[in-house]
Image (cartoon, rainbow, N blue to C red):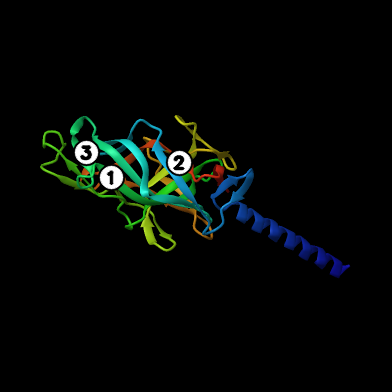
Amino acid sequence: MRFKIIGLCLAAAFVMSAVGVATAQAAEGPKWTVEIGGVKKTLAKAETRSVASIKNLSTTFKLKTSTATIVCTSVRLGTTGGTLAGGNPGTDKVEIVFSGCTVEGHSSCKAEEGSTGKIISKVITMLGYEKPKSENMALDGFFPEKSNEVFAEFSLVGPAEECPKVTGNIVVKPTATNTAVNIPELGTRRCGVLAQVGKSSGTVFALTSNGELFAKGGLNFPATAITVGEHWNGSAFAELKCSLSAGVLGAATEIGESEITLEAGITAFGWTP
């Protein structure tokens, strides 16, 4: 009888251990999921899918600072493109081009890289959750690709009377100022922005929940910035703080809504825990 009881105890312990492992695994993520030919597939580590397009859903994209607000009329995918990458959590690497950028209320004060008429930013994003963690809404944390903290560099160019607090040209460097995360193959990067992950109907952004797939993805950068989330660091969920500075222009918030589509053959995509 004694051996039987011990055996039952060991069996129970094994079952509880298995349940604990399954629960821990289910609590990880979020991960990117795609649908190809009616079949759903969660992207594995190092597995990628190309980003086909990016465009602004909102009329404009803004970089609001304590000194001035930069308003851009167009957001699109850059020439080097972008990819969605599998893993735990899912990530994204993309080149974003902002154009038609001026200082709000001062149309003769242009914001551009050199004299290109554009601002180019290469970013890495990483899926996470809001805090306190809820698996009903995913966030996307933005990190600079080329630097550990600087997203882009551009100048404000125009007459002094049109460019607030500017005498001649001024160089602006939108910079991440918060949590540093180790990004595989790149090293340490700081988080600058948290966006809500959702879908696009072509004109309107809507939030999505886990397991929901959509033909066109969307990101929302709210006027009241989300500054704290949670991300899976490989062994546990950790707090992720994200904030942005525009250097001489002061603290900054990115505001706008965008639409993302993936390569041909992918009929829908989304995220799962």
- Dot 1 falls on a residue whose secondary structure is strand
Q: Amino acid at mark 3?
A: Thr
**Earlier along the polypeptide chain: callout 1 or callout 3?**
3
Q: Nearer the viewer's eye, disc 2 or disc 3?
A: 2
Q: Horizontally, is 38 left or right of 113 in the view?
A: right
Q: Amino acid at mark 1?
A: Ile
Q: Residue at x 44, y 62 (%)?
A: 184
- Dot 3 falls on a residue whose secondary structure is loop
Q: Quadrant of residue 203?
A: top left
Pick the front one: 242 or 197: 197
* Numbered mark located on residue 260 in the image: 2
C-alpha span from label 1 to label 3: 19 Å
- From this viewpoint, is residue 135 visible? no
Q: Residue at x 11, y 37 (%)?
A: 160
Pick the front one: 156 or 263: 263
**Earlier along the polypeptide chain: callout 2 or callout 1?**
1
Q: Horizontally, is 2 left or right of 83 in the view?
A: right
* Numbered mark located on residue 67 in the image: 3
Count of numbered badges drawn on the protein:
3
Q: Is residue 105 above or below residue 212?
A: above
C-alpha span from label 2 to label 1: 19 Å
Q: Quadrant of residue 3?
A: bottom right
Image spot of residue 6 (x, y percent): 81, 67
* Numbered mark located on residue 119 in the image: 1
